[in-house]
Image (tube, rainbow, N blue to C red):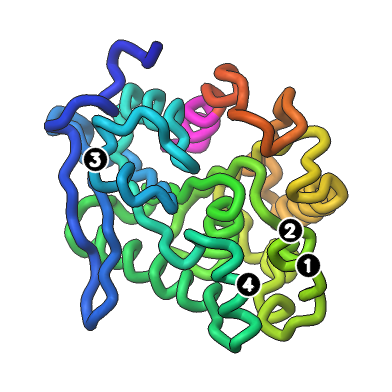
Amino acid sequence: MPPMDSKQYVPEFWTPMMIGAKGQYVLCNFGSDDDGAEDAPLCIIPTQARDVVKDPVNVLEKPNVMTHWLDLLTAAGARILLMHGHFFDSLSELAGGLEAGIDGFEMWQRRVDLVVDEVIERGLGVPGRIVFMGSSRHGFGVLYGTAQNEKIDAAVVIGPVIHWPWLKEFEGMDNHPLIRKHNLYDLVGRLPPRPLQVQQGYADERIGQHHNERLAAMLREAYEASGSPERLALTPMEIPGHSGGPPMHVNETVVTFLRAQGF
């Protein structure tokens, strides 16, 4: 059951919109409570599920959009922006594009930058209160996008893809120039001191548990070096990873973490 104060299934909470200019437009859906605080955090959540972005009220199954996140965050008074991820919709197409020299990661970043700039310009989100959130492929997109965009103020990810060649769709691409160019490990130092929560399973075969452990160690070192270890939360999940959603008590830590960080 969703929290009683959840706005996720209230039609009036949502405003479908297109964000963009100059031929690039992003399908989005903005959720806001008219009675909410003016400085409420804006949680931007990318997904490949276009139908969910179009109509989050009537789609109960939300692939790659954290249903419990939406319940908990809307009940806590956050604003939401569902964002169609597009370039990560199909991993096989992303891999094929890379082989053809099409840089899907760069196009993803342009999309992120466009959305962040416009939500601030429109007043949908307040500078200093922009939170980027995602899982799996979009977990990578959130970490990558946050590292590249200083206007993003905090990030939360579940089971992020870390090293693309570990995925079967990208097998054998370890030395591909575009994979190497957008190596997430090289960007860890750009994340602190912004608040970051990373939820990881204990035996994630899809991601590669050794990559989970390496990323966690590098994040700890980076946040310690920046003098901001309290802004990093590495949250373990009682699931292997990519094998079902996190337990509810883990979902609830998202709100707890963001509130503790001043959001």
Left or right? Give the position of 159 relative to 224.
left
Q: Nearer the viewer, residue 225 or 25?
A: 25
Res 241 visible: yes
Which numbered dot is residue 64?
A: none
Q: Of the residues under marks 4 and 3, which one precedes in the sequence?
A: 3
Q: Amino acid at mark 1?
A: Glu
Amino acid at pointer 2? Leu
Give the alpha-carbon distance from disc 4 to disc 1, as whole Å.
9 Å
Q: Which residue is mark 3?
A: 55
Q: Which residues are magenta?
A: 254-263
Q: Residues within 10 Å of mark 3 (few under 14, many from 20)?
A: some
Mark 2 vs 3, N-terminal side: 3
Q: Amino acid at mark 4?
A: Ala
Q: Which residue is mark 1?
A: 171
Q: How far across and how far down the image is residue 194, in percent?
A: 56, 52
* Residue that mark 4 sits on: 95
- Count neighbours of disc 4 (C-alpha within 10 A) and say few if under 14, some if 14 to 19, many if 20 or more: many
Task: Say which residue appears at 31% left-offset and 33% top-offset.
Answer: 59
